[in-house]
Each structure stands twice: as structure tokens, then as C-alpha cells.
Amino acid sequence: MEEKKFDLNSLIGFLLIGAIFIWMLWLQTPSEEEIAAEEAKIEAEKVIIEETAGQKQSDITLTKAAKQISAISGTDSLGLSKLQNRLGSFAYSGTLPSAREGTTVVENDVLSLTISNRGGFITEARLKKHVTHDSIPIYLIKDGNSTLNFQFSAENRLLNTEELFFEPQISQNGDNQVLTMRLKTSANAYLEYRYELLPGEYMTNFSIKSQGLDGVINTSQPMYLDWKLKGYRHAKSISYENRYSRLTYEYEGDKHSKLGPTGEDDELEVDVNWLNFRQHFFSSMLLTDNSFKEVAFSSIDLVEDEEVDTVYTKQYGAKILLEPRGGALAEKMNLYFGPTDYKIFKKYDRNLDEAMPLGWGIFGMINKFLIIPLFGFLSGWMPAGIAIILLTIILKLALSPVQYKQYVAQAKMKVLKPEIDAIKKKNEGNSMKIQQETMKLQNIAGASPLKGCLPAVLQIPVFYALFTFFPTAFDLRQKSFLWADDLSSFDTIAELPFYIPLYGDHVSLFPILASIAIFIYMMMTMGQSMQTQQQPGMPNMKFLMYLSPLFMLVFFNNYASGLSLYYFISNLLTIGIMLFIKNFIIDEDKIHAKIEVKKSKPKKQSKFSKKMSDMMEQAEVQKKNQKKK
């Protein structure tokens, strides 16, 4: 009986001990609020681990840390300690209300800029007075196509600002709107981006400076400002727009260069004054008051095919080495977002016109000092299409003294055709003699082919200058004339249901008219030459006569219709001048009479002419001797 009693007591004891243990566990059970807090902490740690896994320490920035600090709001000392371990003194920025996604807009009457708290850089740049070919507002920056990152060393950490949170503050400097974006380590110590917009200006004052960061930022280590941008398509023909989209820059004083138009290209330059991410008619530029010591440029062509509806044309990059001054950072710069317009560029007096493809050497000078001012004057008080026609007439009149000699020489060559045919018949089989007699006849009549070639050579600089002017003339953009909606792009009279390589998927009328005019002009000037026997080594005139109009028809189908309009009017004027000279200036009877008179008079040969004649005779003798052998 005692054994059973012992067993019962033991059981009761165990039950009591178990009850006490359960009661103690119940006392230690966390409340619902404590459980929710713990779950949130575990989830936050999980997000941080997932987002930072596999990344370099230099890439772990305040973007990730801000997720912690926004949750703990300064109450979790352990979380704040972890944040400080990663970001050092800059962890302070994460405790501010601005440590969240947000943007600030600054604008004037022509430009609107949206700047993000994250990174402190421009996320939207909109031109208020311009639209694309399909009437969409012009954005040079939008939807993440551009980043501006400042990379620096701080307290043995490599930090990147593109994902750090800045504190925005808007103020006024007279009529100018100012936005400061500050990445803070304390209330009075910060890294600052400063944007200042002037009324009516596309050029924005921009600066980067450090304040009270001595001992925080290590200025002995390299500091880089890395700007990347993908250029948006704005025109009808992406291949045509892409042809004039280039990265250009000024370096070593007044030297200018650009990266390749196709494929991938990169370059490392020193002492860079400005750089331009040009998108044909629009530019995104960064300029500095003091030369950048070193810039690594890159450009990637993103256009593969005209048939592919590509969003971007080029991907640009510029990694800029910034130098501290007096142990701190103080870099004064400018940002330009606006038209690639010679008149606007020129007023800044910083050689920005060199960012435009106006031609090199004398070609660029003709554009800058003659064609651009003249067309600007004409287009200021008349429609652009009429201004092109009037410009063509003025240039024709200005070149008339030079062209007159060319036209007269060509007309005289036609008059001499019977005489030349007679020489050929008389000296049949003797090509050397034919050449000698033909040259002598041409000299007597004053119709040397050289007299027609020299004026043509003198006109080439003007023609080439015009060839570079029309595709870059911002004043032609979206200006209509007759059936052309935009003189800076191709005109369309018919859409093709298929794409023809080199030609396109449309039919432009101005190139057709220009081709017909060129064909008629070449028939007038080369028609007689084609009837003559083709000389060995001489170009096939018939081939050239058909090639030039065909080239105009195909190549210019995608070019600016303003350029084709110019060639059409220019060749019409040329044809009219040729007909006038033939019918009212050239007197064939007088030319023949003059030839006969000069034939009868003994003419003293110059030493050069005599030497050439002797050489030709010797060559003829040698030829005959070879035949005899």
C-alpha cells in the first residue's frame, strides 16, 4: 500500500511541476504587438539580404539602407549601427524626411527639369516649345534613359550618389529659380548639387560642391562624375536622324573632335572644356568653367535597321575625373538641354557651334559667315520654302561671273563640234594628231575645256557648304512648303507597301524633280560629248549622265526636302541661264568667222605649248615605229 501511495504522490508532483512550467511559459509569451514587430524585423532583414546578395561593397548604397532606416526611424540602434557601418557619416541622410522616392520640378518658359531625391540628378528634361514629328513633347531625358552618378571615397568606403537620397530646397536668385540637392552628414555638412534656371534660357548653371566634409571625403582618391544618356528618336527617318547624332567635344584649348557615327567607339581625352550628346536637332551638353582633367568617352550605335521601330539612336557615356580645390570639391559647370541651333550656340561665345556638322575649313566658314546669316535674314520675314528659293537665286547671281565663263565655254564647245568632226575625219586612225588639232582649235576659239572646269571647281566650296547646311538648319524644322510637311525631313507623296534598300518605304517628289532637272542640264552639256567617239581612259559620259540623276533620286529620298528643293531650283536656274546664253549671247557665225581669221594668222607658240607639241609628235613617231616592227 505504501508503494502505491508513493506512486500517486509522484504523479501529483509531476503534474504540479508541469503546470508551473506551463504557467511560466505563458507569462513569457510575447504580445501580438511584439510578435508583429519581430516579424517586420525578420522580413526587413530578409529583403536586405536578398537585395545586397552578390553585390560589391561599393554598390551597397543608401537605397537599401534607407529601407531599414525608414522602418526603424532612428529607434532601432542596432539597425542604425548597421547603416552607419555601410555608409559612415552619410547614413545621416537616411534619417531625413527626404529619404524616400520623390521629385522636384524647376522650370522657366522654355525648359522644364525634374530632379529626383534619389541621386539628385535630372530624371526628366522637357523642351516646352518643341514637339517630335508626331506631335509628342520633346523629352531629352525621361523614363530612366539618363543617369548622373558621382563616385567618391569617404571614410574608407566607395560611395555612389546615384542611389543615395538628397534633400531638395527651392529658392530664388533674382529672377532665377534655384534648386539645391544636398546629401548630408549633419545639418551643416553636405555634398551639394545646385541647379539654377535663367528665364528664357536652355543653358542651366550647375555646380557640385562639398561643405564641411573635411575628413569625411577622401580627396586624395579619384572622384568621378559619370554621365550616361540614351538619345531618344525624334524624327521620321531614324537612319537620317542617327547620321547626324554624334558625341562631340572640345579639348586642349580649342581642339574639337567626335566619336564615330556607327558601331562602338570610345576615347580618352584630357583638358576637356565641354561635351555634347547630340541628337541631330537637339543637344544635351555639359560644360565647365575649368577644363576637366580627364574624360573617358563612349558611344554605341543602337540603330540596326531603318525598318526596326527603334526608340533610341545612340548610347553615350562620359566618365569625368573631378579634381578637388583647396581640399574640397567646388566644380562650376553648365548643363544645356535645347536645340542644336547655330544662333543659340553662337551667343554663348564658347565655340559651341563646333558641336554642329557645318563642314570643316572653308566649308564651315561659308556656312557661318554667309549662308546661315543670309538664310536667317530671309526666313525671318518670309516662309522657309520661299526663303530657300530666294537664297538659291541670290547665290546664283553672286556666282554668275564665275559661272558665266563656264556656260560660255560649254556653249562654244557645241559650236565647234562640226570642226572637231572634220578633224577626226581628216586624221582618222591617228589619235595623237586628232588630239593636237582639237586642242589647237579649242585654243583659237577660246573654248578650252579647262576654262569650263576651273569655274566649276571654284563653285564646289559653296555647293558643299549648302549640302551640310540644309540637314542641320534648325530653322527648317517642322516648316512646311507646298506638299512637304517638314523641310528638315523628307517629303512624302506616296507610301510604299514594302521597304526598298537605300531608297526607303516612301516616294519623295522633290528628289524626283531635282533628278529630272539634273538630267536635262547634263543632256545640254554632255549631249554633244556622248556623240563623239569615246577616247581611251576618258570617263563614259553617257554613264555619268544617267548616274548623277539616279544618285539624286535614290540618295536624297530620305534627305531633308529643303536640300532637294534647293537642287531643283538651282538646276532650273542653270538650265534657264544656259538657254539664254545659247540664244542671246553666243553667236555661232561670229565664232566660226573668228576661228577662220585666227587660222589664217600665224600664231607664235609659247615655250610650254611648243614643248608639249614636240612631245606629242615624238610619241606619235615612236608609235609608228613600233607598228613597223
Image: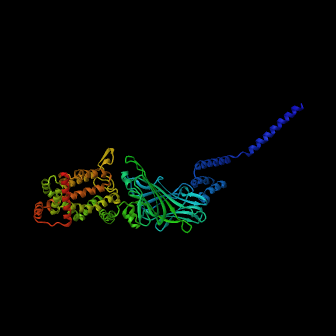
105 left or right, relative to 371: right
Q: In this view, does 387 lie above or below 490?
A: below
User: Given the current orientation, which residue lies at the most extreme right position?
Assistant: 2
Residue 506 location in percent, x, y? 31, 47
User: Residue at (69%, 46%) from the top-left corner?
Assistant: 31
| Quadrant that contains the N terminus | top right
Would you say residue 350 is visible in this rendering?
yes
Residue 253 location in percent, x, y? 43, 67
User: Residue at (39%, 67%) from the top-left corner?
Assistant: 347
Write down the quadrant of residue 448 in the picture.
Answer: bottom left
Would you say residue 491 is visible in this rendering?
no
Depth check, front residue: 523 or 445: 445
Residue 619 location in percent, x, y? 20, 57
Depth check, front residue: 90 or 70: 90
User: Given the current orientation, which residue lies at the most extreme top position?
Assistant: 1
Write down the quadrant of residue 4 in the picture.
Answer: top right
Residue 586 location in percent, x, y? 14, 61
Depth check, front residue: 429 or 216: 429
Depth check, front residue: 212 or 379: 212
